Image (cartoon, helix red, strand yellow):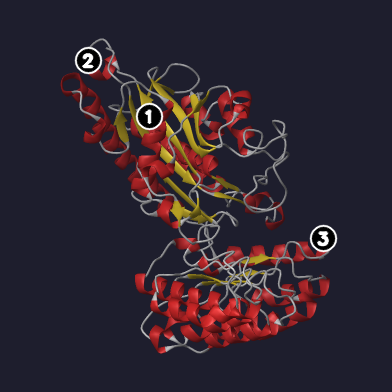
Amino acid sequence: DLARNQLSDGCAEDLLRLLAACPSVERILLDGNGISPSVAEKIYGAAAVNAVRNMAAKGVEDGPDSLRSLNSRGLGDAGAVAVARFIRSHAMAESDLPEVFGLAKNGIGSVGAQALADAFCSGVRAVASVRLLELYSNDPAADWARIFAPVISTCATLTSLDLGSNGIGDPGCQSLCAALRESSLQELHLDYNVIGDAGAAALAEVLPSTRLHSLWVHGNPISPEAKRVLTAVTGINRSRLVPRPDSSHIENQVAVRAAGLEKENARLAREITRKESSQPGSKDLPVEMVETSGWTADAIARVALESYLAWFPGHAERVCGHAVVAAIVEEWDASPSIRGHAASSSAPTFRVVSLGIGTRFVDSSLLDGEGDSRERVKDSHAEVIARRGFIRYMLGQVLCIGNGSTAGNPLTSAGGQAPFRLRSYVRYHLFTSTAPCGAASTLGLPVGGLSGKGGGSTCTPWVQGARKSCTDKVRRWERDGLQGKRLLPFVGRIPLSATVISRKWSSRCSKVFTSPLQTKLKIEDLVPSGQGDRGDSDAALSWALGDLSSGVHDGKTGLSVDASNPPLSPWWLDEEARIVCKRVFK
């Protein structure tokens, strides 16, 4: 950080030599100095080259946010030219770039755009690994459509290109359409590009002969009728190119998760029984099962965060800023039915049953109706992802108990309308690393109010009827239970006992939630706070107990990285509920 140090253009050569000698320096801050913009761009470019070199050397693959670290660096033309030259240099001859490569919001003009396009058309090995190229919000005066048309038609491995907010216009659309006929692109972002009906008509005509199944055109002055035509053609392409998974695939996943849950339940039962004689400390147990001297907000937070660090190692360090994490934590009191005698004052046992990480949602303008919306996760905020994972977890437990596996299962048989019910000594708590968006974290916003409009990280997800913030959704879970419509016929109401909040706690949390608890334990207490440089990630990460691996989907599209239906989508959850019902009540 060299900001506000009275530096001038005269120090440029020294700084460039410093960056060349110290490749570990991937970013340099020069704000508030007397360095001219053109000179600063060269220095920023040298730091960006270090970032590219180090990323290629490490072979880091972080899914949907691999190398967005070059976004918003003030590269301009000079910096973009430096990056392009390095990509084509001998130093990258045996290296691969990450799958996601971002150069957005850099003020890149025609010169820098041409240098980058030439690098991606050069056929060098480094660019062959790039699947998603982000170039949005650069200089709209550059002729981005003409310059990148050859990239679209010749880069066979490139599947997603983001040219949003780059002044494409109707003439640019015509240039892109000719290239799209020969392209492997599956996703194209043209939002906020002053595209009208003429450009939309050109796109609609060419789409059937392309592999595009995701087209972003919101924020353009396109008439409703032209938008409907585009949406219909894109939907046909999606049905043709991205078929839904068949039932046998989902049935196999349900069976695998149930088998995993049976093992986890047996382990839980053994651990609770072992407490009778040994009273082990929390360090002796797996991170998903920590015992405490009494359940507290800090105990719930610790088991949630330790599970997050176990399932997503390195994530907290890689993000820029603070990760937003939520978890559903299961609490077991000392139980006579497991312990074999009357409950004592032994500490309860906690285990994390679902995790969610994310800050994105799908803008309503991207959906082509209820059919398409059911195949996407419309709200990918951490709390919502964790709760959807909880539904998958509980569906697995229904299948376990239906198969006769009762030890360590939170459910037991019931004689009421629902065939099963929650055991009386099992409770569920929500942990969130940051106060939920909406009234709990926004000054002056009433409960039920909106926290913003449009796509992005502000929570106004698309739903039939009203839009709800995460505060509103947590309040609904407090009132109606966590189970939702899919679990209700199986298990009845599952209460949410407490909401544990870490960062951004305020008196508003106590006012809007029924059972809020404050914890002062934060992610940075367990691991260094995020000093990474991945930019603002669109990735939504998830895990539920019984899963063999964690999941990831794109929070802004609501789809998996390959554009297929993610397991947390309404359509997939309905399929799992149907399969469980068929197996349990056959």
Asked if 376 appears above or below 212 in the picture, the reply is above
- Could you tell me the amino acid type at mark 2? Gly
Label ID, residue 528: none
Q: In this view, does 342 lie to the left or right of 24?
A: left
Seen from the viewer's position, the closer of residues 128 and 19 is 19
Neighbours of disc 2 within 10 Å: few (<14), some (14-19), many (20+): few
Neighbours of disc 3 within 10 Å: few (<14), some (14-19), many (20+): few
First along the sequence among labels 1 and 3: 3
- Could you tell me the amino acid type at mark 1? Ala
Seen from the viewer's position, the closer of residues 227 and 122 is 122
Asked if 251 appears above or below 299 in the picture, the reply is below
Q: Which residue appears farthest toward the left when viewing the image?
A: 277
First along the sequence among labels 2 and 1: 1
Kindly state the secondary structure of the residue where label 3 is placed.
helix
Instruction: Give the Cα distance between marks 2 and 1.
Output: 26 Å
Label ID, residue 299: 1
Residue at position x 61%, y 27% from top? 507
Seen from the viewer's position, the closer of residues 173 and 82 is 82
Mark 2 or mark 1: which is in front?
1
Residue at position x 56%, y 88% from top? 118
Residue beneath label 3, please?
Answer: 224
- Could you tell me the amino acid type at mark 3? Pro
Q: Which residue appears farthest toward the front when viewing the image?
A: 6
Seen from the viewer's position, the closer of residues 162 and 533 is 533
Residue beneath label 2, please?
Answer: 340
Give coordinates of residue 564: x percent, y percent: 52, 59
Instruction: Give the Cα distance between marks 2 and 3.
Output: 67 Å
Residue 183 in sight in this render: no
Instruction: Give the Cα distance between marks 1 and 3.
Output: 52 Å
Kindly state the secondary structure of the residue where label 2 is placed.
loop
